[in-house]
Amino acid sequence: MSNTKIEECLVLLRQADTMLMEENEIALAAHLSLVIERLAMRLPNHVSSEIH
């Protein structure tokens, strides 16, 4: 998958994550956040959101 496609997916997934959080669907948002993180890891300039 190209970096452009990954970035497009991330925009949409982050929008969905925000919507879930607004609806208090915390468990689903947490799972989606993991998917977002895994997908973002494919980008060359990715900086992990994990605290080391």
Image (cartoon, rainbow, N blue to C red):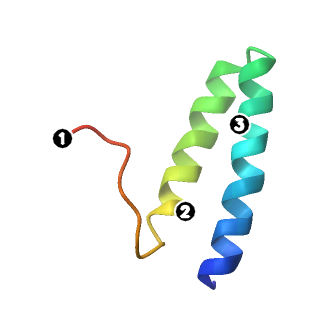
Position of residue 47 relative to residue 2, above or below, is above
Name the residue tied to disc 1.
52
Residue drawn at x 66%, y 58% as measured from the top left: 10
State which quarter of the image contains the N terminus: bottom right
Q: Is residue 48 left or right of residue 28?
A: left
Measured as percent of width and height from the top left, residue 37 is found at 49, 52
Local secondary structure at mark 3: helix
Query: Real-space Cα distance between discs 3 and 1?
Result: 24 Å
The kind of residue tagged 3 is Asp
Name the residue tied to disc 3.
17
In the rendered structure, find residue 39 and report the number of the disc placed on it: 2
Local secondary structure at mark 2: helix
Residue drawn at x 58%, y 51% as measured from the top left: 36
Residue furthest out toward the left: 52
User: Earlier along the polypeptide chain: callout 2 or callout 3?
Assistant: 3
The kind of residue tagged 1 is His
Measured as percent of width and height from the top left, residue 41 is found at 44, 64
Viewer-closest of 20 and 47: 47
